[in-house]
Amino acid sequence: MYSEKSGVPKSDKKTTTITQIVSIVLVSVLVFTLAFAAGCGAKGDSIVGKWSVPEEGADDFPPGVVLNFKKDGTVKIELADNAPEEIQLAAAMFEMVKIGYKVSGDTLEMTIEAFGEKETDSSKFKVEGDTLTIFDEDGDVASVLKRAK
């Protein structure tokens, strides 16, 4: 029952081969799953994080504001260290505003709730490196945000 070449019993050699095949299959499934998840979630997850409003380039948001897109689908409004004084004075108002978001392909849908009112707006968007560009309904650039560091 021993292999003449290796001195290992034939049944152990068979078990080793099966174990190697199972290991290769499991590693392949894991790699495929991670690649698939990264490919499917890349667009939606790419917006997650903090985006700062520069002094110019954002018609929809005042300079000094940081939009924190969280994984749970909410947006928290924060202030940059260099936020203008009038924005700092309005910071207490930000706590009374609830913002949610959903990403579907290249569309960003944001729902804002404040003072008993609720409004939902959809826009096309694009993330390239550390730049988030939001487009208006005509396809023109409405806001350009930079990833906060």
Image (spheres, rainbow, N blue to C red):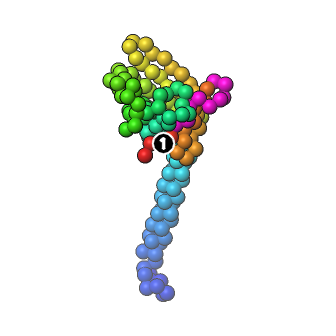
Q: Is residue 25 magenta?
A: no
Whether residue 77 is visible here, answered yes or no, is: no
Is residue 141 found inside the magenta-colored segment of the image?
yes
Identify which residue is drawn at 43% across, 33% down. Answer: 64
Instruction: Tell me which corner region of the image, top left, top right, bottom left or bottom right, holds residue 49.
Output: top left
Category of crowding for the residue at label 1, using alpha-carbon neighbours closer than 10 angstroms: few (below 14), some (14–19), many (at least 20): some
Residue drawn where x is 45% and y is 21% of the image: 112
Check disc 1 and report the residue beneath it: 147
- Please state the horizontal and vertical placement of residue 82, each as a whole percent of the image: 40, 37
Of all residues, the one furthest to the front in this rendering is 85
- Numbered disc 1: secondary structure: strand
Inspect the image, locate mark 1, and give the three-letter code of the amino acid beneath it. Arg
Percent position (x, y) of residue 142?
59, 29
Residue 17 sits above or below residue 115 on the image: below
Query: For residue 106, which quarter of the picture?
Result: top right
Q: In which quarter of the image is the N terminus?
A: bottom left
Which stretch appears magenta? 137-145
In the depicted view, which residue is nearer to us: 136 or 62? 62
Residue 12's spot in the image, x, y percent? Answer: 42, 74
- Locate residue 135, reporting x and y percent: 61, 30
The correct choice, above or below, for 47 with respect to 7 in the image is above
Residue 79 seen anywhere in this rendered image of the structure: yes
Residue extending furthest top?
A: 116
